[in-house]
Amino acid sequence: MQAIPQQGDCCTTCTEAVTVAVPGAAGADGAAGAQGDAGEDGLNCCTETTAIFAMPAEGATVVVAVVDNQSMFAGMIVQVENCGYMEVAAIPGGSTTSVTLRNIEDSTTGQYPDNVAPATNVASGSVICPSGPTGPTGADNAPDDAEYWCATPSAGLLNEVDMSALASGYVKVTTGTGQPSSVDEIPDEDIEYDEQAIPGTFIIDWDLGRTFYRLLAADTIFTFANTVAGKQILVVLRQGNGAAWTAAFPATVMWAGGVAPTMTITSLAYAVFSFYKCEATGDIIGTVLNDAY
């Protein structure tokens, strides 16, 4: 029979030191990385001529030397300084410093009448910028059954009225006819103008319309006539140029906070006054928008 093996002594003691890693304080930030490459500059939508050229005849073309043509394409409308409106007819092959332009003035239809005359020299350094086609002139499409009031008649419209020949005073613009029989029938577009800005007093007749305009040229007292219950009117005042004129309305007007507003003192600024006469009480309520440019 064999003997039972006996456990011997440990070869090492159980009291050896154990090393533990303890984190220290964070170190300083590292250096910044290198800057990336800059992007390419965009193309300038405008360019300049680098040599004198003569304006071609209507519908004809001319090759123009330019700083850069890379923003242009065939069919593009451009405006040429000291010249007028032209069309890019072509981009010469392989060139970035020239462009073929066409004179698009048409005397027959009246298109681009402000272009310089053919054979006119256009200076070097003239700016060329993208543009767009213009529409037909107003006279060509004006209705034949209308009447036109003009400060300077052009003879391009039918039934022109020369306002410069009229006596000074008020001009009332309205689409209505006759005296309205009720408030609801007063046309909204009725307006009474007073461009002469006669100083002193000014009577606002509620029967004449809904909107009244006046350019101040002195301290002015406004009075009401023929007020209409349930109706609202607008009084548009403009301050004088470099002046600070005052505007006073009837003391019976009820203002916010019970205090009448002060007219804007900003030169040539607008103030829009609104007045409403209450049907139930007959009170006239006023509000104002000052410095309405």
Image (cartoon, rainbow, N blue to C red):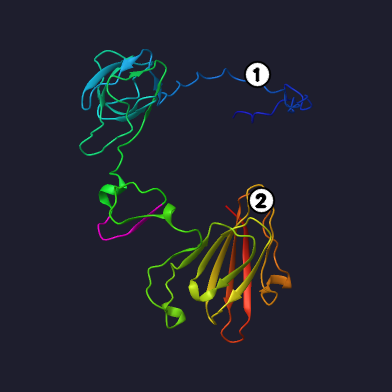
Q: Which of marks 1 and 2 is nearer the N terminus?
A: 1
Q: In which quarter of the image is the N terminus?
A: top right
Q: Mark 1 points at which residue?
A: 31
Q: What predominant SS class does the magenta segment belong to?
A: loop
**Quarter of the figure with residue 220:** bottom right
Q: In this orientation, which residue lies closer to the viewer: 174 or 132?
A: 174
Q: Looking at the image, is mark 1 or mark 2 nearer the viewer?
A: 2
Up the image or down, 179 lies above or below 80; here it is below
Q: In this view, does 155 lie to the left or right of 272?
A: left
Magenta span of residues: 143-150
Could you tell me residue 55's position as x and y percent?
29, 21
Residue type marked 1:
Ala
Up the image or down, 95 lies above or below 19; here it is above
Circle 2 — which element?
loop
The crowd level at tag 1 (other Cα within 10 Å; few <14, some 14-19, many 20+) is: few
Circle 1 — which element?
loop
Residue drawn where x is 55% and y is 67% of the image: 234
Up the image or down, 56 lies above or below 220; here it is above
Q: In this orientation, which residue lies closer to the viewer: 17 or 1?
A: 17
**Quarter of the figure with residue 58:** top left
**Quarter of the figure with residue 286:** bottom right
Look at the image and say whether residue 123 sits in the magenta stretch.
no
Q: In this view, does 208 lie to the left or right of 240?
A: left
Q: In this view, does 271 lie to the left or right of 16?
A: left
Residue type marked 2:
Thr
Residue drawn where x is 68% and y is 29% of the image: 6
Q: Name the residue under label 2.
A: 266
Could you tell me residue 77's position as x and y percent?
30, 31
Look at the image and say whether residue 144 sits in the magenta stretch.
yes
